[in-house]
Amino acid sequence: MLAVTHPVNHPAYDSRRPEASAAAAAAAGAEPLRGALGDLDVIRAGVGKADGVIHLAFGNDFSTADAVARSVAEETAAITAIGETLIGTGRPFVTVSGTPWVPGRPSVETDPVPTDGPVGGRGRTVTTTLRLAAQGVRTSAVRLPRTVHRDGDGGFAGLLTRIARGSGVAGYPGDGAQRWPAVHALDAAVLFRLALENASAGSVWHAVADEGDPVRDIAAVVGRRLGLPAGPVPAETFGPLGPIFATDQPSSSAHTRATLGWTPNHPSLLADLENIRP
């Protein structure tokens, strides 16, 4: 049995249609575990029966800094509960974080994740979780890029699209030269499976297919598909994520590909954005 905690970023999960998502999981051979990320007793019970755990959960409210902080705290509590339940079992626990950014070059798997800023708490939690390798948990972390996409939606590019629909401009902060890495959701799902099956305790992996697309190129496709102009807008347009949106953050997955044999083969971000409908 595999436990996947409240998979709001999973390609089969739709938070607006939980019953349909549960049916899709059951059709794939899984036993749905009903509950929210804050239901720690439900999570502990499910983890106790699982052969391995993949954690993919995070709240979708990025409207304010307080909302993001609440999501970080909720996720931390859930991950802590999972880790404590697995201590001494030798079972795999694959958690998730974001690829870091390093000035002047693409980030790699050995670079530390940030532990400050709007989502710095996630970095602290993942770092602590990886240390459970010393307590009999086969922990690993899959770092997702800024955009995990499918059918033209998802991640930062999806947020940019939704903001464009409301504002009438496919905007980006600064000159748009900053690069965002990306991966198709189905390719990312394969990497999570590989990590669950084969990753060594305490290891880190990058789910990066596109090392970094300039944000102005992303906005250009979004604007063309929506029939809107593309151009620079204030970073405040993107709320508490504005500083992250403005950061150049390319990332490499060379080590991940060579070590785990991961080969992404689904459409790139710019190609997938062609699926956006007005």
Image (spheres, rainbow, N blue to C red):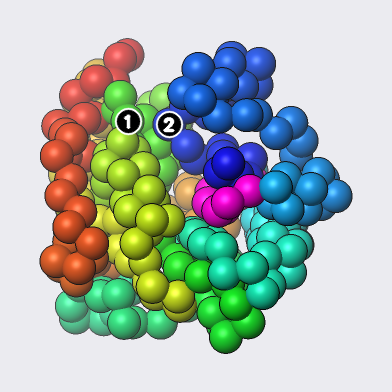
Nearest to the observer: residue 183 or residue 254: 254
Residue marked by disc 2: 11
Q: Please indicate whether residue 268 sits to the left or right of residue 27 in the image.
A: left
**Residue 207 versus residue 100 in the image, above or below:** above
Residue 83 makes an appearance in the image: no
Question: Which quarter of the picture shows residue 3?
Answer: top right
Who comes first in sequence, dot 1 or dot 2? 2
Judged from this view, the residue extending furthest toward the right is 41
Give the CA separation, mark 1 to mark 2: 8 Å
Query: Which of the 4 image quarters holds residue 177?
Result: bottom left
Q: Residue at x 36, y 42 (%)?
A: 189
x, y (%) of residue 191? Answer: 32, 51
Q: Give the number of callouts.
A: 2
Rendered residue at 46%/23% (across/down): 28
Q: Is residue 24 above or below residue 40?
A: above
Place of residue 39 in the rendered image (x, y in percent of width and height, measured from the top left): 82, 45
| Badge 1: residue crowd in 10 Å (few <14, some 14–19, many ≥20) | many
Q: Which mark is residue 198?
A: none
Q: SS at mark 1?
A: loop
Q: Which amino acid does label 2 sit on?
A: Pro
Q: What stretch is highlighted in magenta?
A: 50-59
Residue type at mark 1: give it: Arg
Would residue 189 be visible to someone looking at this image? yes
Asked if the magenta segment contains residue 142, the reply would be: no
